[in-house]
Image (cartoon, rainbow, N blue to C red):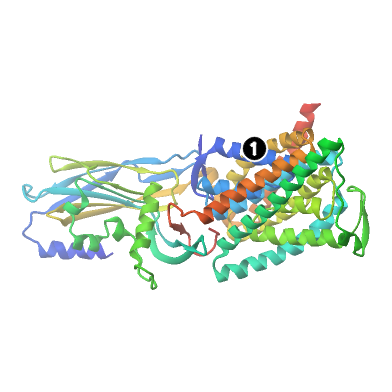
Amino acid sequence: MIWRLALLCLLAAAPLRAEEKVVAGLSQARVSITTDFEGSEILVFGAVKRSAPAPVEPPLHVIVTVAGPALPVTVRKKERRFGIWVNSEAVEVDAAPSFYAISTTAPLGEILSETEDLRHRISLNRAIRAVDIGPTKGGPAPFTEAVIRIRREDGLYQIRENTVALTEDTLFRTGIALPANLTEGDYTTRIFLTRGREVIDAYETRISVHKVGLERWIFNLAHAHPLVYGLLSLSIAIAAGWGASTLFRMLRG
Amino acid sequence: MQIYLPIAEVSVNAFLLLGLGGIVGILSGMFGVGGGFLITPLLFFMGIPPAVAVATGANQIVASSISGLMAHWRRKTVDLKMGAVLLAGGLIGAALGVAAFNALKQLGQLDLLVQLCYVLFLGVIGWLMLVESVIALRRARRHGAPAKRRPRGWVHALPFKVKFRGSGLYLSVIPPLLVGAAVGLLAAIMGVGGGFIMVPAMIYILGMPTKVVIGTSLFQIIFVTGFTTLLHAATNYSVDMILAVLLLVGGVIGAQIGTRLGVKLKAEQLRILLALLVLLVCGKLALDLLLEPAELYSLAAPAGGRG
């Protein structure tokens, strides 16, 4: 993990700075997707642990990010050709998180430097990796921007500045709303403390999102025994069609 | 009531799905179309991934088609012999269609071809049906008796003639085989049952009576879409059982209502309605191609799944 190394370097390079550590917890570390799953609100809370009195300047800020599993995405662009709109250029983004939320105590640009953002991959632009992009008109930027724009509209990417409540420079808390259309997997939750646009401490934990019960059973069956699953789906369809027809005939007398 | 779909991995309103299934079921029972050309785009609008929408749509069509077929079966408006010939052609066509589908996928622009196919076929068929039905309806009003439609001369000139008692036809097996194959081919490429192409083809090319056409096309559709469902489940894991159950509960009830409505309406009126419906879907798809989309970019999972 690059950021861990970076953090070590940072701590080694600044031994004079009063040490501040982040201690954090989550209201739940597991999210179970059931049939009536409608999304989930997770409370991220914590405190800053100090060995010396807190410095007054520069002010302390907190950034909380939650990232879903990173998956490759194909982004296609439509262009007008012969009077109709067709897909022309396509770009494969190597890894884009299926979900990403950033909560901060102040606008991100004011509390985090470009270098630190690059190192820890905190902002949305940095969270998306697009390394191997072929030659495109206007470069890869419009394509990664499109991923962010489309997913923000779907509520999958959230930028919520000024939503972390920081009390007495010590206690902080924020709520992260996970939407209903979640992908299964581990959701990496990171908490950064910053002073003077530099990251002074970071904490990482995971929220595990998994299907349970009927959802789990259906998903497993579909992947482990696809033919059985297909036949079962088909039998349900045939039985339902037959059943409804018979029922309606009985109702008519 | 929101419900989470395990394969599609999205949460949708259960009643919306029941209603959607119901509407498609009514159309299926009335017109003998599977409704694939409606249900797939509608599911897509609801945020269901396209691959899941296509595969689960096929499963739902099996249910509503069986429900519709049973109703027609009891009224003896199914020509089994004709259905079997169409099915034989259909399976050959579908096999060719899947091969063509994969070849086009490698060339890219498959989506565009599918869309153009939709616009072209829906447009031509819808327009022809509308014109012919309006003329027939006017003539029927004037003379008080429906005009008899006759198949064209070349259809009668072909060899291997067989008696199709259900349809009251003495016809060569070649035209129904070809119609079945053409429909199977298009159905595989376009990812639908193909009823909306087959029904007009049976009426205008084979000269079958409208009442028999619907039951017979449903018979063929059941086997083709059933096969498609299995294929999708086995290769793409894209059939969502919970989505299918919700759609088919609405669908089978709708199909029963549709069949009853179909009996009450006159054959010519029925065809005008179907023509208008086909033209409506065609118009929507054509507009999507012609107008500048609000969002020029689209996201898709790489490899596998159609977008």
Residue B156 makes an appearance in the image = yes
Q: Circle 1 is placed at which residue position? A: B22
Residue in the picture at 75% in, 32% down: A247
Q: Callout 1, which amino acid?
A: Gly
For label 1, the crowd category at 10 Å Cα-Cα, with few meaning under 14, some 14 to 19 and many 20 or more, is many
In which quadrant of the rendered image does the N terminus of chain A lie?
bottom left
The image quarter in which residue B182 lies? bottom right
- Locate residue A181, reporting x and y percent: 45, 46
In which quadrant of the rendered image does the C terminus of chain A lie?
top right
The kind of secondary structure element at disc 1 is: helix
Above or below, A146 against B109 in this view is: above
Residue in the picture at 76% in, 51% down: B200
The image quarter in which residue B142 lies? top right
Residue A242 makes an appearance in the image = no
Residue in the picture at 71% in, 56% down: B227
- Locate residue B96, reporting x and y percent: 71, 67
Tell whether B171 sits left or right of A14: right
